[in-house]
Amino acid sequence: MTDSNENNAAGKQLTRAGRSRRDVLKLGSAATLGALLGGGALLGRVAPALAQAGSEAALAPNDPLDILIVNYDGGTLLDFAGPSEIFHRLPNTNVRYASLNGGNVTLEFGVVYGKTERLADIEKTDLILVPGGSNLAVPMGPAYQAQIRRLAESAKYVTSVCNGSLVLAATGILNGKRSACHWAFLNKLSEYGAIPVSDRFVEDDHGRFMSGGGVTAGIDFALRVAAKLRGKQAAEFTQLVIEYDPAPPFHSGHPRDARPEILAMVDKELPGASKGLARVPGVR
């Protein structure tokens, strides 16, 4: 019993420490932005100033934005962790997480992500994001599909990262729409009526449909979404705050750059990958 109490106390201390670090980053970011915008801006004044800075944004400065990220067992953490890091820092933006039954979901590699809302309890959202995963059996199920389709049909923006586009496509909402996907699964999109596009970011229908390529493309995707909805300055500010300045040690992140022997290794692990037709559990 003592060990349990000590562990709980340690967990609370860790949570407070994590929040404190994030608060410091936010305050530091606010101070930096205040200097850039003319000095002395307090934290409470940062969001309006940031929102007003992007006149090209699709949303007005004071328009609220509600973002829903769909979670499920077998999902990939980075697919939505990268975008959520960016979305949480945008002004007048609320980010929610939901799964079919609510509560905890067990992601890829056994990572437990908790306290999601129940999809059926959410009436609507402005933007829905469906991340991908190593196993799509759960979100491809009829109950999940029905909830995703319901929310996507009424959403202003329908988005995905990685092979989450396959989940969306299976609902029928991407029929005839251009979409990105992880390169290994890209051409599976056409089997569901979507149009596969081998780009890191793809949009259709004047930006109502936006998608990112595989896993790490979610960060690029989210910055593009941020720029479209909240303006370029808001996106650039967020990019700087999270120090997104990629400099990969190897040029092996896409088949067009990878050495043939590396591509062969992936093909052995995921048969059909080099043709964009790799199979993932849950997808016929």
Image (cartoon, rainbow, N blue to C red):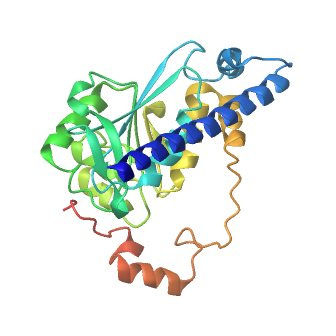
Whether residue 7 can be seen here = yes
Residue 63: percent from left, percent from top: 52, 14
Q: Nearer the viewer, residue 46 or 43?
A: 43
Q: Which residue extends farthest left?
A: 142
Picture coordinates of residue 78 (x, y %)?
47, 53
Q: Nearer the viewer, residue 245 or 30?
A: 30
* Left or right, residue 172 beside residue 15: left
Q: Against 143, is 198 above or below? A: below
Q: Farthest bottom residue?
A: 261
Say which residue appears at 30% left-offset and 57% top-offset: 74
What count of labels does the image hold?
0
Occupied quadrant, residue 137? bottom left
- Say which residue appears at 33% left-offset and 61% top-offset: 110
Q: Position of residue 148 (x, y in %)?
A: 25, 37
The single residue placed furthest to the top in the displayed view is 62
On screen, residue 72 versus residue 254, left or right, reads left
Above-or-below relation of 224 to 30: below
Identify the residue shown where x is 33% and y is 37%: 115
